[in-house]
Amino acid sequence: MQEFFYWIGELVGSGIRAVVDGLHWVFEQIDGVLNSFVDGLTEALGISSSVFSLAFLLIGLLLVYAGVRALIRTAVVSGIIWLLIGMLLLGWLIR
């Protein structure tokens, strides 16, 4: 009787181990893809791959987006201001 429960425990443990190994592989692949993307992006733009540089890049792109949206809504003055601030930030970041 004890051998039966040993066998069931071994089977359940092997199943759990397979699931954990599979999830580890998936997350390892996602990490590799994200690292490659960030390295390619930062190398193409000529910026460092630090979190602060990426945050400033995102903020600059959001400011440019806000400027374009303001221009589409025919708010010309605010659109120009948002675009100017966004382009200044991106120009400072990307040299």
Image (tube, rainbow, N blue to C red):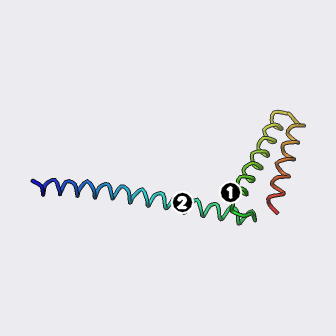
Quick check: 69 left or right of 17? right
Q: Residue furthest left?
A: 1
Residue at horizontal 84 percent and vertical 51 percent from the top: 87
Task: Find residue 53 and report its horizontal and vertical position in percent.
Answer: 73, 57
Element marked by disc 2: helix
Question: Few, some or many C-alpha atoms within 10 Å of disc 1 (few <14, some 14-19, many ≥20)?
Answer: few
x, y (%) of residue 57? 74, 53
CA distance for labels 2 and 1: 16 Å
Answer with the quarter of the image where residue 94 lies. bottom right
Left or right of 87, for residue 55: left
The type of residue carrying mark 2 is Asp
Number of numbered discs visible in the structure rendering: 2
Q: Position of residue 35 (x, y in %)?
A: 59, 62
Please name the residue that numbered disc 2 is placed on: 31
Residue 7: image x %, image y %? Answer: 17, 57
Residue visible at 69% across and 60% down in the picture: 50
Cβ atoms at labels 2 and 1 below 8 Å apart? no
Which mark, by number, is residue 51? Answer: 1
Left or right placement of residue 5 versus residue 72 in this view: left
Q: Is residue 76 above or below residue 37?
A: above
Judge from the rendering whether residue 31 lies leftward or rightward of residue 60; answer left or right: left
